[in-house]
Image (cartoon, grey):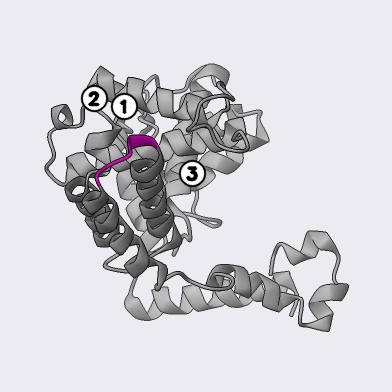
Amino acid sequence: MSDNALQNHVANLKAAVRRFAGLKRLSGRGIPFTPAWEALYDQMREPRLRLGLSGFLRYCSACGIDPASVSNPTVEAFIHYASEVQFTVKPKDLHKQVTRCWNRAQEHVPDWPQTVLTVPDFRPKAASLPWDSFPASLVEDIERYLTLLGGASLLDEDAPDRACKPSTIENRRACLRLAASAAVRQGVEPEELRSLADLVSPHIVRLILDDYLAKKDGKVVNFTIDLAERLYAIARLYVKAPEAHIQALEKYCVRLRKRRRKGLTPKNMTVVRQFKDPRSRSRPWRDRSRT
């Protein structure tokens, strides 16, 4: 089936659902502009603005909303309609598109309303706290450890046999920041984490691992296993923690290692399976991205 045929079937299915559910179309082709909106639409010269705002302007026309009355709640109502009635696949992307094009139109359309719409930010909240949330002594200790990994002192007895690459060091820095932030989420006061010795103590490590297990509803992912291994290595090689602490951390690692996933993830396996089909292998690369 060609892409166009598939799109036609999808459009027909959406129309059938709307008809039997008694849902009225308020946007899209066939919905006329009111005179006020048509005058503004005719002033648009950029195809990008026309494409990005056409549906929203037709929705406002159908709802009797004049240009001067548009506000953030108006856009939110349109996005709700587009999601529930038009079955828009990516309503968040549509929300950003409408608000950005609306604000951009103020620069290119002379009579455009001067109401500035808020462009939503759907990015997830940062999983880690900024470094200045923690004691300076912890940050300094972490930097000493990372400097050691970078091979700054080849004669240091704790220096690694091979210096870590800058990308590896940055990854270790990010992991330690995530670990410290997880401990705080579990109720540890930032002031309690004065050094790496505090961060890799068995009690704190247990809280960190519990936090990541809870985030995945108890599922053990490779990141959690690797984080436990790194904290264990720091306690053993850098902090030189007491033997009892080392044994406790090693037990965490042993239990988690047994749950390490082997092979490719289901998402990657789905991609690989496409190449088992001779028809997929013979298709041009530009068409494979649509599979």
Residue kind at label 1, given as amino acid type:
Pro
Residue 133, label in figure = 2
Q: Is residue 241 magenta?
A: yes
Whether 285 is drawn above or below 264: the answer is: above
Residue 52 seen in the figure: yes
Position of 86 relative to 62 (above/below): below
Q: Are circles 2 and 3 on residues that touch, CB within 8 Å?
A: no
Q: Are marks 2 and 1 in contact (CB under 8 Å)?
A: yes
**Of the residues tagged 2 and 3, which is closer to the observer?**
2
Magenta highlight range: 238-242
Q: Which residue is mark 1?
A: 130
Quadrant in which the N terminus appears: bottom right
Q: Secondary structure at mark 3?
A: loop
Q: Secondary structure at mark 1?
A: loop
Q: Is residue 34 visible?
A: no
What is the secondary structure assignment of the residue under circle 2?
helix
Q: Is residue 135 magenta?
A: no
What residue appears at the point 32 percent right and 59 percent down from the top-left corner? 250
Q: Main secondary structure of the magenta part?
A: loop
Q: Quadrant of residue 265?
A: bottom right
Between residue 48 and residue 197, name the one nearer to us.
197
Kindly identify which residue carries mark 3: 33
Q: Residues within 10 Å of mark 2 (few under 14, many from 20)?
A: few
Separation (CA) of disc 2 from disc 3: 53 Å
Q: Residue at x 37, y 81 (%)?
A: 20
Splitting the image into 4 quarters, where does residue 49 fall?
Answer: top right
Which x, y percent locates residue 79?
A: 37, 50
Of residue 93 and residue 259, the one placed in the foreground of this image is 259
